[in-house]
Image: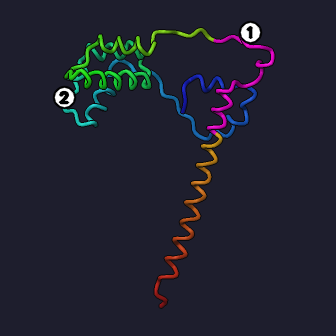
Amino acid sequence: MGQPELDDKLDSRNLRQLKQRIALRSQLGCLDLAETRGYVHRRLQIAGNQNPDEVFPMDTILEVHRQSRGLPRLVNTLCENALIHGYARQLPTISPEMIADIAADFRLNVEHAPESPAEHSPAEQGRPSEEVAQAARTLLDLYSYLRNAQQSRADLRVLVGARTHKNEPHI
């Protein structure tokens, strides 16, 4: 799972072998307003709050949705920071203004222009960036770890099965 930009990176010629090793893919889209409200309220309920409308009233949810554009990762960031600010100020309710301030602090309204290949030096063109190379190494390490864990579980089952058979009384 990753950001939509990960697909663009994996589509590059240099990462085709990594792309072929990805066995499971999932993409989480943007939440609409009702889903954002349900998501925030459900997380508060799981945390033990019995009245999430008091903490995040509808006008605040509207601002969360507007600032996050429905991206769950940004919904989490905004709400978590709002709860920390609210706790520090001993406020029972998170206001829309607080959400707007947090979004401004995190520069969520700043849009980046897409990079063009011309912005890179000729030596950099056609080579994955250090970020992409690090992401590829991380994914390969994760793949190796999961394969080893799977093998370890299989070895453990064989070992446990062998010990169980030794301790069974012979009839």
- Name which residue lies at 44% across and 16% down: 106
Q: Nearer the viewer, mark 1 or mark 2?
A: 1
* Amino acid identity at mark 2: Asn
Q: Residue furthest right?
A: 122
Q: Gap in Å between the C-alphas at discs 1 and 2?
A: 53 Å
**Residue 37 screen position, x and y as percent:** 31, 22
Give the vertical position of 56 relative to 96 (above or below): below
Q: Residues within 10 Å of mark 1 (few under 14, many from 20)?
A: few
Q: Element type at marker 2?
A: loop
Residue 110 left/right relative to 82: right
Give the vertical position of 8 relative to 115 (above or below): below
Give the magenta-colored segment's residue range: 115-139
**Residue 160 screen position, x and y as percent:** 51, 71
Magenta residue check for 72: no
**Residue 143 screen position, x and y as percent:** 62, 44
Work out which quarter of the rendered image holds the N terminus and state it: top right
- Name which residue lies at 55% across and 75% down: 162
**Residue 33 screen position, x and y as percent:** 34, 18
For mark 1, what is the residue?
118
Magenta residue check for 123: yes
Give the vertical position of 144 relative to 133 (above or below): below
Residue 72 left/right relative to 87: right
Answer with the quarter of the image where residue 133 lies: top right
Q: Residues within 10 Å of mark 2 (few under 14, many from 20)?
A: few
For mark 2, what is the residue?
51
Residue 143 left/right relative to 65: right
Q: Residue furthest bottom?
A: 171
